[in-house]
Image (cartoon, helix red, strand yellow):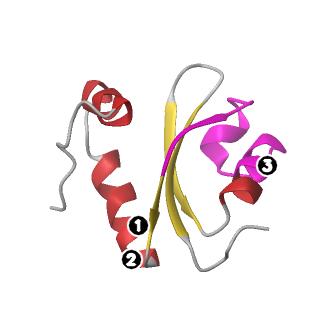
Amino acid sequence: MENENKHYFYVVKCRDNSLYAGYTNNLERRIATHNAGKGAKYTRARLPVICIHFEIYETKQEAMRMEYAFKQLTRETKEKYIRGASNEVTEK
């Protein structure tokens, strides 16, 4: 069982190759929830989803800040970040 005191920023790739970013304190359960069609409205029509990136943070606020910053990026910059080729995600 995952430690519920961990805070995850995660990115999933949907069936249509779009990306969805989110926050959770239980990554395994959250991905299962998405794939059961009970997650975010955005992912429900784009199943299945595959987790392609995640980061663990000490606090919920840090993880949610990262989620917000990631969502502000262009698709190209998001892909570079996921590949580890960019550190362009910064808090605004």
Q: Is residue 47 magenta?
A: yes
Q: Earlier in the sequence, mark 1 or mark 3?
A: 3
Residue at 28% across, 54% down: 69
Q: Residue at x 41, y 66 (%)?
A: 63
Residue type pointed to by label 2: Gln
Residue 22, horizontal then vertical, whole percent: 51, 54
Q: Residues within 10 Å of mark 1 (few under 14, many from 20)?
A: some
On residue 55, which mark appears? none
Q: Identify the element where label 2 is drawn.
A: helix
Residue type pointed to by label 3: Ala
Q: Quadrant of residue 17?
A: top right
Amino acid beneath label 1? Met
Along the horizontal axis of the image, is 88 left or right of 31? left
- N-terminal-most mark, 3 or 2: 3
The magenta stretch is 31-54
Do tag 1 and tag 2 residues touch (Cβ < 8 Å)?
yes
Residue 55 lies in quadrant: bottom left
* Residue under label 3: 32
Crowding at dot 3, Cα within 10 Å, few <14 / some 14-19 / many 20+, comes out as some
Pinpoint residue 66: horizontal percent, then vertical percent: 34, 59
**Structural distance between the alpha carbons of marks 3 and 2:** 23 Å
Task: Depth check: give the residue in front, 8 or 67.
Answer: 8
Label 1 to label 3: alpha-carbon separation: 20 Å
Tell me if 82 is positioned left or right of 48 in this view: left
Reading the image, the residue beneath label 1 is 64
Residue neighbourhood size for the residue with mark 2, other residues' Cα within 10 Å, grouped as few (<14), some (14–19), many (≥20): few
The N terminus, quarter of image? bottom right
Residue bearing mark 2: 61
Task: Name the secondary structure under disc 1.
Answer: helix
Q: CA distance from mark 1 to mark 2?
A: 5 Å
Residue at the spot 27% in from the left edge and 46% down from the top edge: 72
